[in-house]
Image: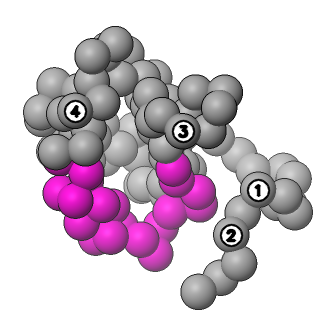
Amino acid sequence: MIYVFTLMDKPDGLPLRLRVRSEHKAYLAAVADRIAFAGPLMTDDGQTMIGSVLAIDFESRDAANAWLAGEPFTRAGLYASVNVHAFVNLWPQKAGFPPAA
């Protein structure tokens, strides 16, 4: 099952996000083969990161929550709010995704 994580940073979180970002990206790399999509939430000008949206395949909600507990931004205390929802993708993506590398 894919679980979608909607993770909003604390209002003053940008410096912390930038400090921990390389650890966060390495942690994501460990599950890269199970990521449906992932990226930062931005302000409307597209310049400032204010959170994250991650859609990752896990065997259960417990596994998703355990993964999130070890995630570097979570451990660093970056998030003001966390939502985790099961997700079924019923629409093929055609926009907003970078070309495959």
Membership of 38 in magenta stretch? yes
Q: Nearer the viewer, mark 4 or mark 1?
A: 4
Q: Are marks 2 and 3 in contact (CB under 8 Å)?
A: no
Q: Using the image, determine if residue 29 lies above or below residue 77.
A: below
Chief SS of the magenta region? helix
Q: Say whether residue 70 is visible.
A: yes
Quarter of the image containing the C terminus?
A: bottom right
Q: Using the image, determine if residue 38 lies above or below residue 17.
A: below
Secondary structure under tag 4 reads helix
What residue is shown with label 4? Answer: 15
Magenta segment, which residues? 20-39
What residue is shown with label 1? Answer: 96
Name the quadrant containing residue 41. top right
Task: For label 4, count other residues whose C-alpha is less than 10 Å away and answer few (under 14), some (14-19) or many (20+).
Answer: few
Q: Amino acid at mark 2?
A: Pro
Q: Is residue 21 left or right of residue 99?
A: left
Task: For label 2, count other residues whose C-alpha is less than 10 Å away and answer few (under 14), some (14-19) or many (20+).
Answer: few
Q: Residue at x 62, y 38 (%)?
A: 46
Alpha-carbon span between mark 4 and mark 3:
14 Å
**Disc assigned to residue 98:** 2
Secondary structure under tag 3 reads loop
Alpha-carbon span between mark 1 and mark 3:
16 Å
Membership of 73 in magenta stretch? no
What residue is shown with label 3? Answer: 47
Q: Are marks 4 and 1 in contact (CB under 8 Å)?
A: no
Alpha-carbon span between mark 1 and mark 2:
7 Å
Name the quadrant containing residue 14. top left
Q: Amino acid at mark 1?
A: Gly
Q: Say whether residue 72 is visible.
A: no
Residue 20, image x, y percentages:
17, 47
